[in-house]
Amino acid sequence: MTITSNQVRPLLVAGLLSACVAGTVVATAADTPAATPPSTSTATQPAPNASAGKSIMDTKVAAPSKAESPDTAFRKLDYSGKGYVTKDDTSALSGFEKAFQDNDANHDGKLTADEFRKAWSEFSGNKY
């Protein structure tokens, strides 16, 4: 069987789509055409390994213990380096809600490093 140049692109696209559905995509610049036509697939399900495309910065670490310094705790909770923590970031800290509320000075739903230090001191019972 001979494959013509008109058949190459659809075959490559079909192969890539099949690999995406299987959750294993291995492609190099040489394997991928310069301009891929829009996909006609209507599949909206995530790949079997939903964390495959996440960076290490998107992965939460264990919640800090009350014995940790406020700066260490803040860095653990602000794992993505955005410069603040949200209620969602601190949700693993049972009982931290009141300290969060008390120290969110501008009521924006975020604690800056300075606001967090005060909240952490209140929460942990340690003076820093």
Image (cartoon, rainbow, N blue to C red):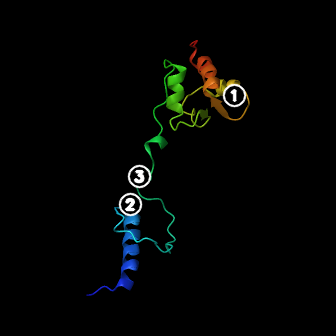
Residue 22: quarter of image: bottom left
Kindly identify the amino acid type of the residue bearing the numbered disc 1: Asp
Q: Which residue is mark 3?
A: 52
Q: Which residue is mark 1?
A: 104
Sequence-earlier tag: 1 or 3: 3
Q: Compared with residue 115, is residue 33 higher up or lower down, i.e. above or below?
A: below
- Secondary structure found at label 3: loop
Sequence-earlier tag: 3 or 2: 2
Kindly identify the amino acid type of the residue bearing the numbered disc 2: Gly
Q: Residues within 10 Å of mark 3 (few under 14, many from 20)?
A: few
- Residue at x 48% of width, y 75% of height: 37
Question: Residues under labels 1 and 2: Cα distance?
Answer: 42 Å
Q: Which residue is mark 2?
A: 23
- Residue at x 41% of width, y 69% of height: 17
102 displayed left or right of 36: right
Question: Residues under labels 3 and 2: Cα distance?
Answer: 9 Å
Residue at the left extreme?
1
x and y, in percent, of residue 99 in the image: 65, 23
Q: In the rendered structure, are the residues bearing label 3 and label 2 in contact, judged by CB atoms less than 8 Å apart? A: yes
Q: Residues within 10 Å of mark 1 (few under 14, many from 20)?
A: some
- Secondary structure found at label 2: loop
Q: Residues within 10 Å of mark 2 (few under 14, many from 20)?
A: some
Sequence-earlier tag: 1 or 2: 2
x and y, in percent, of residue 123 in the image: 60, 20
Q: Residue 10 got which mark?
A: none
Kindly identify the amino acid type of the residue bearing the numbered disc 3: Ala
Question: Residues under labels 1 and 3: Cα distance?
Answer: 35 Å
- Residue at x 62% of width, y 34% of height: 87
x and y, in percent, of residue 12 in the image: 37, 74
Residue at the top extreme?
127
